[in-house]
Amino acid sequence: GAVRGVSITHDGARLVSCGDDATVKVWRLPRAGLGEMFSSGGAATPEMEAELSCRSRAGGGFRDVDCHWGRDAHATAGAAVELWDANRSEPTDTFEWGVDTVLSVRFNPVEPDVFASCGSDRSVALYDARSKSPLRKLVMQNKCTKLAWNPMEAFNFTVANEDTNLYSYDMRKLTTATCVHRDFVSAVLDVDYSPTGREFVAGSYDRTVRLFDYNGGHSRDVYHAKRMQRVFSVRFSMDGTYVLTGSDDMNVRCWKAEASAQLGTLLPREKRKKQYQNALKERFKHMPEIKRIARHHHVPKAIHKAQKLRRMMMDAETRKKKHRVLHSAPGAEKKEFKPARKERVVAEVE
């Protein structure tokens, strides 16, 4: 069956994979250096170390897997969230909270015993590996597909939603989002943070890749290619210099995280010039001419038209709300406008 998720262990020695065949496989990764790999005519082939079979279920299969950041353990997402130990062939703990299918699971890199999952019931659930029960759950109006933790702030995470937006939350207060990230015109399928925690990348069903500041409402850059199809997977490189994307056209692409960045070694005077240019842009970013250049991005014609249509629909909805409040009967309870950070939240369950 199809392989749905892969994850590297914290020591980099093994790889854990899962898929539709309802098994979890642990692979031993080769430790050879680059010289040995290329001198032998190719990279070494990983060997399967163990196969961890799960109980048979209706529907079966796993949707995602993620490894613990501090010890040899991993969590899988399927009919439930299951916590596995590397030395056992059965899950050590099973977490269930009334959801048919768990779509993704991610461990917190700062607090490694805390992890979160996205479910098909439009929920985002938080867990603690040290306890035997989930902590709390957030229910939204639309389904969340993926989740990413901020590697520099233990309590902040961002979810990719099917309503074309991304939402950043503080796990201590899930009733309101800390920021709503817009600009996509179709469902967002994956999200991943930079190692610095200051920006993240997201891929969408509309065949574009966008880069956001961690607190920015709109994307600072957008990448697209004529032959690139739906973007199902995105990742930041560990030095924050590159972005890797996997799309439906069977290609993996490597992009620069900063499109105008010069590759290679820079001379000291070149570094000073770059720093001076960045300081000028930061100082005069409020000027209309500079702001227009910074926010202008060329996008395919289909996406440009979809953005225009989406703006018209949102303006019409806002206008309708204003008219409903304006013309309500005297004494009737008037509909209050909810901010966008609270509008999509249905409930918080503990």
Image (tube, rainbow, N blue to C red):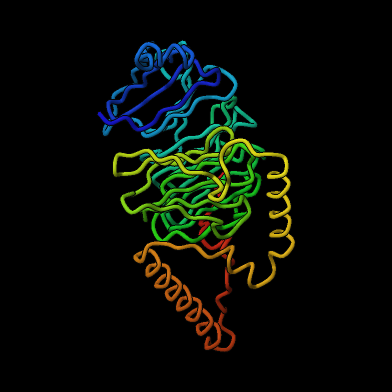
Residue drawn at 41 percent across, 47 percent down: 189
Horizontal placement of 211 versus 90: left or right? right
Of the pair 142 and 97, the residue shown nearer to us? 142
Q: Quadrant of residue 185?
A: bottom left
Of the pair 226 and 319, the residue shown nearer to us? 226
Image location (x, y in percent) of residue 303:
38, 64
Q: Quadrant of residue 271?
A: top right
Image location (x, y in percent) of residue 48:
35, 13
Image location (x, y in percent) of residue 275:
72, 49
In the displayed structure, would residue 323 be above or below residue 265?
below
The answer to whether residue 257 is visible is yes
Query: Which image quarter is the C terminus in?
Result: top right
Query: Which image quarter is the N terminus in?
Result: top left
The answer to whether residue 176 is visible is no
Residue drawn at 59 percent across, 85 percent down: 331
Of the pair 168 and 224, the residue shown nearer to us? 224
Of the pair 234 and 261, the residue shown nearer to us? 261
Q: How many marks?
A: 0
Horizontal placement of 133 versus 254: left or right? right
Residue drawn at 61 percent across, 50 percent down: 214
In the displayed structure, would residue 150 be above or below residue 72?
below
Image location (x, y in percent) of residue 332:
56, 82
